Image (tube, rainbow, N blue to C red):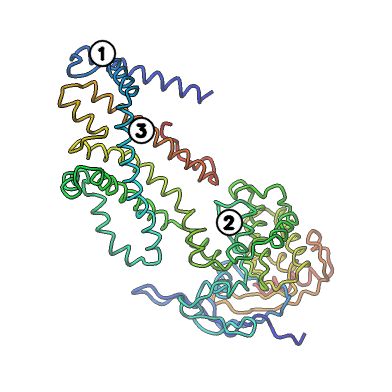
Amino acid sequence: MAQPPLLEIKDLGKRFPARAGREPPPWVIQGLSFAVRPGEFLTIIGPSGAGKSTLLNMIAQIDTVTAGEIVFDGQAVNSHDPRTLRPGVDRRIGYVTQDDNLLPWRTTIDNVLFPIEVQGRLNDQTRAHAEMLVRAVGLAGYERYYPHELSGGMRKRAALIRTLAYDPPMILMDEPFGAVDAQTRMQLQADLLKLWELGRKTIIFVTHDITEAIALGDRALVLSRQPARIAAEHAIPIPRPRNVQDIFALEGFAAIYERIRAAIQ
Amino acid sequence: MTRWRTITDRLLVLVIILAAWQIGSAIVGPYWLSSPWAVTSRFVAQMLSGELIRQSGYTIWESVCGAVAGGVPAVLLPFLLRRHPLMVAILDPFMVGGYGAPKLAFAPLFILWFGIGIESKIALVASVVFFIVYFNTLAGVRALDPKLVQMAQIAGASERHVARHIVFPAAVPYIFAGLRIAVPYAIGGAIIAELISSNRGLGYLVQTGAMNFDTTSVFAAILAATLIVHGANWMVNASERVLLRWRPQTAVMVDAGD
């Protein structure tokens, strides 16, 4: 466990610029610090509007920081100036957003291959890997369908494997399974764990669902309401591989759930 | 079933129009208003002699050259200015002015500047097409979802990739909406320019027909122009269907009469 962290958040702060003639808005995030080990599955739980998406946007470098520091792979990557942002920091940070953001004019397989294509890495091997992922999440037979022809759950899967296919060492996930029904959601969680067991990437998974945070994570951080700070931290010692279908029955689940619920109050 | 119904109903409307025309012709006399039958026979005769085909060919060629000369910069400019909103804002009142100015009134000027040959017709068509396509393409570039761009940037897409894979495909439906409006104007613009001064083209046929009190020739030329617009519309619709097959069916606009 003496490994240096892959990502370190140090005393991070964010407030959006004031509109002309108004009071500056309050801090969305203030004094937020945590670290993520390589290969760790970290879940972050927070109430809606707690600045979870803002936090991920800053790590993904599509939004500027107001205070503090983000260190990725030993290198400070935070930026105060929107013009010097480097989205995805050289393709090393993937981001699965709440919306699937599939390109409507590309078929499923072409959407999954899009990052590989623009990175100039399209070859038989990367294509075969992408096709394997398509089959692994049950999208076989839908490769030539356009996004509007897919169900919500299928679109989520396509968006998920689009990021997995180009293999960034760290992946941020912002409530990726938020807008689907409970049944599909559980299936997606199982798919994600299966894929993660294959590659053991470093994942930061943001959710407002305590059960989801426990089912997926090695460790769960609980954020406070605005300004967002770490309210509590919980290790999740449930052994892997986990079966998300009967996560409730697993030893230790109830106790962790109760502790996290209490921390959120 | 509905498709056949549409076709039969369209034929019915056509018959009503032709009947009204025939009756009108009988009332005011064929000297003022030629009859549909006379126009059709003249149209067929002129087609067979090659005259109408040759003159239509000139008009089509002028329209195509003008549409390309006006349409290509109109599509490219919003892309080049995408990262320079200030430039767009500076240009805006001038573009609105150019859009609003009655281009057909410029036709005599273009003939003064470029002569009575094909150049003045291309200039007029280009000036009509440019502003229509420019504003539609601009709307498409502006309507782009910034989240798609962020997704692409995170995935490692360069500015060029973003323009080609995100901005352009997203703007294509808007470009087509512009073309749909611009195509009839392009053909109309070419004919107006020919009317004013030319020795060839459908506008020239209309002009000489009217000067000789030969309304049959005028209507035959107008019929040819109408068929050309229909053909051009059909081509726009067909290429739209191919290029935009990724869109849900309900989002495709009602096709305008092909």
Q: Which residue corresponds to mark 3?
A: B228
In which quadrant is the N terminus of chain B drawn?
Answer: top right
| Mark 2–mark 1 distance (CA, rounded to whole Å) | 59 Å
> Could you say which is closer to the camera, residue A66 or residue A260?
A66
In percent of width and height, residue B122 lies at 28, 46
Give the side of residue B252 with respect to residue A5, left or right: left
Residue at the image point whose x is 58% and y is 52% from the top: A106
What amino acid is found at the position of numbered circle 3 in the picture? Ile
Name the chain under label 1.
B
Q: Are marks 3 and 2 on the same chain?
A: no
The answer to the question of whether label 2 and label 1 lie on touching residues, with beta carbons closer than 8 A, is: no
What amino acid is found at the position of numbered circle 1 in the picture? Ile
Q: Where B121 sits versus B23, above or below?
A: below
In percent of width and height, residue B244 lies at 51, 45
- Which dot marks residue B46? none
Give the side of residue A95 with respect to residue B122, left or right: right
Name the chain under label 2.
A
Q: SS at mark 3? A: helix
| Mark 3–mark 2 distance (CA, rounded to whole Å) | 39 Å
Q: SS at mark 2? A: loop
Name the chain under label 3.
B
Q: Nearer the viewer, mark 1 or mark 3?
A: 3
> Could you say which is closer to the camera, residue A200 or residue A47?
A200
Q: Which residue corresponds to mark 1?
A: B23
In percent of width and height, residue A85 lies at 50, 76
In which quadrant is the C terminus of chain B drawn?
Answer: top left
Q: Bin the neighbour count of mark 1 within 10 Å (Cα to Cα): few under 14, some 14-19, many 20 and up.
A: some
Q: Which residue corresponds to mark 2?
A: A102
The answer to the question of whether label 1 and label 3 lie on touching residues, with beta carbons closer than 8 A, is: no
